[in-house]
Amino acid sequence: MHVATPEIERLDPASNLTDLVVKRLGADPARTVYSVQQGQSLDALAWEEVTAFQFLERVRGIAKGLIASGIQPGDMIAVMSATSYQWALVDQAIWFAGAISVPIYETSSPSQVAYILSDSGATTVFVAGKSPARAVARAIETHNLGAINQLELTEAGLSGLAASGSDVPNDDVEAARTLATMRSTATVVYTSGTTGTPKGAMISHGNLAEGAVNIVPFAGDIVLSDPNPRLLMFLPLAHILARAVQYFCLVADIQVAHTSDTSNVTKIMQAYQPTWLLVVPRVLEKAYNAVLTQADEATGLRKSLLTDAIEVAEQWSRAHQANHMPVGLRIKHAFYNRVVYAKIREVFGGQARAAVSGASPLNEKLAHLFTGMGLEIYEGYGLTESTAPAAVNVPHNARLGSVGKLVPGMEAKLADSGELLLRGVVVSPGYLSQEDTADSFDAEGWFATGDLAEIDDDGFLYITGRTKDLLVTAGGKNVSPAPLEETISTAPIVAHAIVVGENKPFVGVLISLDTDELRAWAVRRGKVGLTLEEARTDADVHAEIQSYIDLANQSVSKAESVRKMVILPTELSQETGHVTPSEKLRRASVVEDFDEAMDELYG
């Protein structure tokens, strides 16, 4: 099957993404484009507004500093930092200087940093924070990278850089800024490397700029639903999803604030009051667990109300999608909307009525639950190579459980194997490595995503698994682990579920517990002090997880069902090397590193 969504707008091929920025921001220089958090006290949060004029002046000043330091058009400049307003400044300044940005996750190890710097050829890197600075220094020292110019991504560092370029003429910046075209590379973003060595995907000026003018109108009912739209950006800007959305917001008159304080993000949301949310599924899972904890800890009438409210929210959303709403359900939902759901929405600041979820698969149950509570969830789909959003659900054209329809300017079709192929305005022209490009892109520009998919008659996309994750049991049964893992991972005490069974007699699952949730769960059940090691064999813990395994098994045949679980002795994380910064599992490394657990499953 082949589907396509016509593009809404084309831009001048000779222009670039900074032209769109200059045009849009120049049209209203007094509008607020960013809000910068002032101070660290969560009890007295304040915001300094940055106008379009102020932002452009600062960007040009930093670009002058880069030019004065010897940066030439086409040079690679790496950025290793937590999400911040300063990140937004240097992103544009790099492009205004005619250079190419190369993001590095702030949690990257020295070897990962060394690989990206070496592979990209970047000889300048912006760094913020002690840990990233140590990682860069160690990478340079232990991998013989040669001369790497390190710049501080702080207010003081950027001010000093701008001062060093004060003598650079405005014409020099303009010449560098306008040199690139829509076909030129704007940024090189490295894939997560879940199944091999990370690949540097070249994202063009056109991918970002034409993505913005096509996607923003398509999703306007979400992102522009308020007269003064606001977004709190807390996802890592090293991830293409956050970077792309930040650019879209800049040229679409959506004010953005930043925070990297993910442990207090809900408090910051309550102060900033975003009008829509950009999230990854793990954020919604954590919020769902908090709701379940409230219900679990409540007593009497309050417990009954909360428990029923959770069930009603999901039922209402499913009935609404099916366009069949029983009168009794409508009445109960209206009641809970006043006494329960409104308070839950306050956790997200109270103003947001919609959230876009991306980066990894979202469990359909969670989407229905939050939609029923008045925070409509619109799941999207994309990859690094598609500049993130290639498809997304939008109001009046949504189907929960799918990842929506293609954004304007995109085409999709399925290979004979069921693999999803993409082509269009947001699809990368390829990787830095010509060999990698040849492996994933054909002569007609179709990109092989590596995702298995289905497309229904209305054009909605459903991602059913990864081609490389597909398991074949000893009995010859093909099993896609993703749907099973999504359901099992909704158990509050489960951080990650890894379904296994390649060449094995049955399907099993390795469980990584969420130690914070486990601690709270144990207290509620009179098991204070329950350790992770004790939990591995605790009957109540097993029963709790088994209930979610049973739920997952209802959606598959007996041959595909999970027969046995083993709880891992360690919580999987980025630090252990088993989870990427975007919360994707490195499945092969889990199976390889926990051979004793695999023996326990199949021994």
Image (cartoon, rainbow, N blue to C red):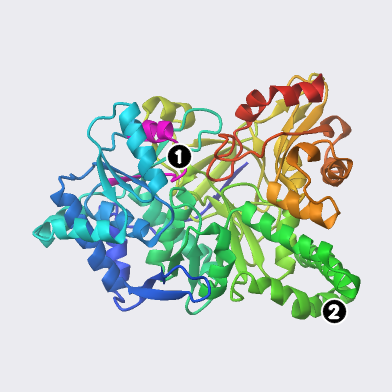
Can residue 103 be seen at all in this image of the molecule? no
- As drawn, the label of residue 68 is none
* Residue 147 visible in rendering: yes
- Residue 117 vs residue 318, the one in the foreground: 117
Residue 288: x and y, percent?
72, 59
Residue 29 higher or lower than 355, as above or below = below
Tally of numbered tags: 2
Q: Outermost residue toward the front?
A: 529
Q: Is residue 575 above or below residue 507?
A: below
Q: Mark 2 points at which residue?
A: 331
| Amino acid of disc 1 | Ser
Residue closer to the observer: 509 or 505: 509
| Residue shown at the point (86%, 42%) measured from the top left | 546
Mark 1 vs mark 2: in front: 1
Q: Between residues 447 and 248, which one lies in front from this camera angle?
A: 248
Quarter the C terminus occupies: top right
Please tell me whether mark 1 sits on a helix, a strand or a loop.
loop
Residue at the image position 59 percent from the left and 73 percent from the top: 349
Mark 1 or mark 2: whose residue is earlier in sequence: 1
User: Residue 394 location in percent, x, y?
Assistant: 60, 63
Quick check: 409 left or right of 96?
A: right
- For label 1, the residue is 108
Q: Is mark 2 on a helix, strand or loop?
A: helix
Residue 104 highlighted magenta (yes or no)? yes
Segment tinted magenta in the rendering: 100-117
Residue 356's x, y, as percent?
58, 60
